[in-house]
């Protein structure tokens, strides 16, 4: 009985729990990546001295934020983390963004409780798991004990109805969601996505909406597992898992979104909730387009952009960087000709990973430049110089913008 979050924790603990209760639970997976693991190791060492992680098969380190290493400091960091992983018998995953690779590898199943040293760990809620980001110190404790404490959060229900109009995509729906809720409107809340639109979404699209939960301050974003979930997991996992669902849920509030009323949207700097219709900013010239990230670097995202760009060339004053979310996505996009389309258009295609999203390498912005990207954040200085501006859009809007050199309505392409 309760919200999906309450049901998951009740199932895990074998008793009924409700929002507002503080609990300590055994977690199913613990994850950190190349830039958050060093601090987690420090916390782990202080707690255990020379001890072992709670379970090397359920502890995961992913190299994705600065891959390949772009500086001596990054290379040194990677070396030190590899030494820890070897000592602890933890396999390092270096085949793409943690939030794409973890589900692909079958490390996320419905009913799981997962903690990760990255705020977008909430992405895994697309498969019916309670997944949340934590600081590296808490992750170090989880590596040592296999446990974490939680204050069971209240839940906001985002109810999505209607059908996506021509030229409007799931990313546009997330902008409307953040605009309505606000960048801090869901602080320490779980967000549960329901409605006919969500039921029609692919798992990839569900990853997108759950990924953006943290952009409203959310603790987690969740979609109840269904036949679509089972189909996606088939072949990825070979163990039983519960198909949990909310029952007589009491939501803190319900946010209604009718997708049929939406047009392509743009999140303007410096906040994700600074959302306007694309028509209002079509005059803005763009220096760089970035297609990728844990929000929109999956195969269907690349397909949307490639279908618009096939046989065309980038605007001569605009550069484009494409980074598939994982090696699996990269190989399939290569087989289907999407990467060839981008390269022929004049784009650069990068190694699967986070790429320019965090401004560490491979597409850093110069002073005064503007970017249109498919990522989840447009904070000042995120992609490079603090005077650069970051606009967010869908993969279709990104493709249209790359061709025109200005923010463009994808419906015209």
Image (cartoon, helix red, strand yellow):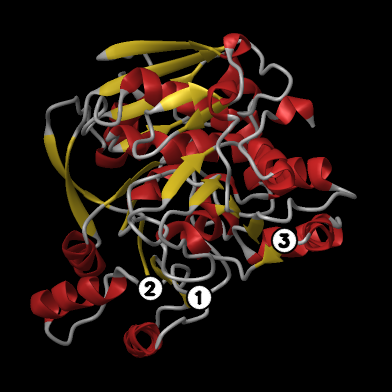
Q: Earlier in the sequence, mark 2 or mark 3?
A: 2
Q: Secondary structure at mark 3?
A: loop
Residue at (35%, 27%) from the top-left corner? Answer: 191
Report whether 340 appears left or right of 5. Answer: right
Q: Which residue carries the number 2 mark? A: 34
Q: Which mark is residue 347?
A: 3
Q: Please tell me which of labels 1 and 3 falls first in the chain.
A: 1
Q: Which mark is residue 121?
A: none
Where residue 33 sits: x, y (%)?
38, 68
The correct choice, above or below, for 22 with respect to 292 in the image is above
Measuring 22% from the left and 77% from the top, which residue is drawn there? 41
Residue 128 position within the rendered picture, expressed as x and y whole percent measured from the top left? 46, 36
Extreme residue toward the right, this view: 311
**Residue 88 seen from this side:** yes
Q: Vertically, is 363 above or below 235?
A: below
Label 1 residue SS: loop
In the rendered image, which residue does mark 1 sit on?
Answer: 67
Which of the pair 173/232 is nearer the observer? 173
């Amino acid at each position: 009985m309760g919200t999906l979050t309450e049901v998951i924790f009740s199932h895990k603990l074998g008793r009924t729990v409700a929002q507002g209760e503080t609990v300590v639970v055994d977690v199913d997976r613990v994850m950190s990546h190349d830039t958050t693991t060093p601090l987690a190791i420090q916390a782990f060492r202080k707690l255990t001295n020379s001890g072992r992680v709670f379970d090397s098969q359920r502890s995961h380190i992913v190299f994705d934020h600065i891959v390949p290493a772009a500086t001596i400091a990054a290379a040194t960091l990677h070396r030190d983390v590899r030494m820890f992983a070897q000592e602890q018998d933890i396999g390092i995953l270096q085949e793409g963004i943690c939030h794409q690779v973890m589900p692909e590898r079958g490390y996320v199943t419905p009913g799981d409780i997962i903690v990760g040293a990255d705020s977008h760990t909430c992405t895994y809620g697309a498969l019916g798991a309670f997944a949340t980001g934590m600081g590296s110190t808490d992750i170090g404790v989880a590596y040592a004990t296999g446990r974490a404490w939680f204050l069971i959060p209240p839940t906001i229900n985002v109810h999505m109805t209607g059908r996506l109009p021509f030229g409007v995509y799931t990313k546009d729906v997330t902008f409307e969601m953040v605009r309505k809720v606000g960048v801090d409107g869901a602080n320490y809340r779980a967000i549960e996505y329901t409605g006919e639109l969500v039921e029609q979404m692919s798992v990839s699209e569900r990853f997108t909406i759950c990924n953006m939960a943290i952009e409203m301050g959310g603790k987690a974003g969740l979609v109840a597992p269904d036949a679509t979930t089972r189909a996606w997991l088939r072949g990825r996992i070979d163990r039983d898992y519960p198909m949990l669902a909310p029952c007589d849920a009491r939501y803190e509030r319900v946010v209604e979104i009718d997708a049929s009323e939406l047009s392509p949207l743009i999140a303007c700097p410096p906040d994700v909730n600074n959302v306007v219709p694309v028509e209002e900013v079509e005059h803005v010239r763009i220096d760089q387009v970035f297609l990728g990230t844990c929000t929109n670097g999956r195969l269907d995202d690349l397909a949307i952009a490639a279908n618009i760009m096939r046989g065309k060339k980038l605007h001569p004053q605009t550069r484009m960087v494409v980074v598939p979310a994982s090696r699996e996505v990269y190989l399939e996009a290569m087989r289907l000709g999407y990467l060839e389309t981008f390269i022929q258009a004049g784009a650069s295609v990068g190694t699967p990973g986070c790429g320019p999203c965090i401004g560490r390498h491979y597409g850093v912005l110069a002073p005064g430049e503007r970017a249109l990207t498919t990522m989840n954040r447009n904070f000042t200085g995120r992609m490079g110089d603090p005077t650069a501006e970051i606009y967010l859009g869908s993969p279709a809007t990104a493709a249209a913008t790359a061709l025109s050199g200005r923010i463009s309505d994808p419906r015209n392409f």
